[in-house]
Amino acid sequence: MVRDAMHEELTRWRSEFPILERKVYLINNSLGAMPRKTRERLTEFADDWDTDGVEAWHKWLPLVTETADLIGGIIGAPAGQTMMHQNVSTLQAILASCFEFAPPRNKVVFTDLNFPSVAYVWLEHRRIGARVEVVKSEDGIHPPTGALLDAIDEETLVVPISHVLFRSAGVQDVRAIIEKAHAVGAMVLMDSYQATGAVPFDVTELDVDFCVGGSVKWLCGGPGACYLYVRRDHIESLRPKMTGWFSHKRPFAFEMGDIDYADDIHRFMGGSPSVPALYSARSGYEIIAEVGVEKIRARSLHLTRRVMDRALADGLTVNTPREDEARGGTVCVDFEGSEAASRTLIERDFCIDHRPSCGIRISPHFYNTEDECDAIMDEIGRIRSGH
């Protein structure tokens, strides 16, 4: 009965996501469904620009901080310690630009299961002295936590980790990684893109140094709205080389010469904000905050377990950790011909995707139903049998 009550509570939100009326939407690990109110807010942005012209900046600029604090509330960040940006790759580069990579503490440690864009950023910093160690996974599914912990030593500067792996949805033991890094004087940069809005966590309680993520996936906020959390002591001490006028203490003084960094989180901001993305992101943030990530996680574990059990019963390969605590919001199923089958599923209005060495990624959110999870598995069965 508890599960039935939760089902009724969460599926009431379905009417707020119009695409659910037309498609079986199980691609939330890649692009969350658009809230109905997002269209209204984007119209509001256009109206502000059209009506007020340049004066609209008086409304737009406060939205940067307001939106950042919305997402900060979801991840446990104190007000004023989160800022908005356009993408995680740029945020990683901004943080990397804070460091000199002077030996002996010039080592960067991460695993080969990180999102490739993150690896590209750090590997290129070898040109200015970074010594990069990439820890290999044995199976491509489970994070190699033990080997990663062993690689973190007194010469390690920063450990960029994925909170939830993009390919397999494996969950990293972030607490163990943070504790080991801090014990040897290293910092941890946690990429929570595949966790935020689906897996509960608190950046303050974890004592993580930095956290990045974005709105495209479980936050249902669309592209162009990513966030950076920085622990208070690092806000005051770090000086990014990758900077811009909004990182200045007095941006509208337009002062030539060396930058006088802002005393607050804005020192990591760089150039002008992407205002339309702030309008598009807010509705999803508000919904996730109101529903609560704890409830979303409970619903996710129930639905992903249902998909996983069915896949195993049907003889499919499951490239996702089986244990609830080790799994994010996605189940990856594979079989001969899965890539072609994924295209057929999309043609039949089942929204999923396919990734190499992974298979079909099925990612129910809180607004999805058991019937939808059963329907996609039934459809996979029909496709495999030639129908």
Image: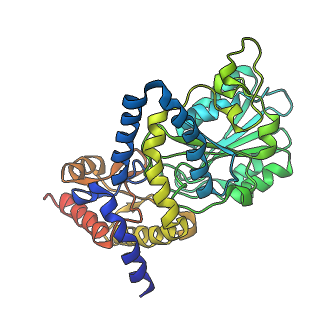
Q: Eyeballing the image, is 313 above or below 127?
A: below
The quadrant the N terminus occupies is bottom left
Residue shown at 14%/57% (left/top)? 386
In the image, 122: left or right of 154?
A: left
In the image, 236: left or right of 139?
A: right
Camera-nearest residue between 275 and 7: 275
The tally of labels here is 0
Whether residue 218 can be seen here:
no
Residue shown at 46%/46% (left/top)? 281
Camera-nearest residue between 45 and 359: 45
In the image, 120: left or right of 27?
A: right
Camera-nearest residue between 132 and 259: 259
Image location (x, y in percent) of residue 296: 48, 67
Considering every residue shown, the one lying at the far top of the view is: 256
Image location (x, y in percent) of residue 204: 73, 56
Considering every residue shown, the one lying at the far bottom of the view is: 1
Residue shown at 46%/59% (left/top)? 287
Image location (x, y in percent) of residue 335: 32, 56
Whether residue 94 can be seen here:
yes
The quadrant the C terminus occupies is bottom left
* The image quarter in which residue 310 lies: bottom left
Image location (x, y in percent) of residue 262: 74, 31
Colouring mode (rainbow / by chain / secondary structure / one colour): rainbow
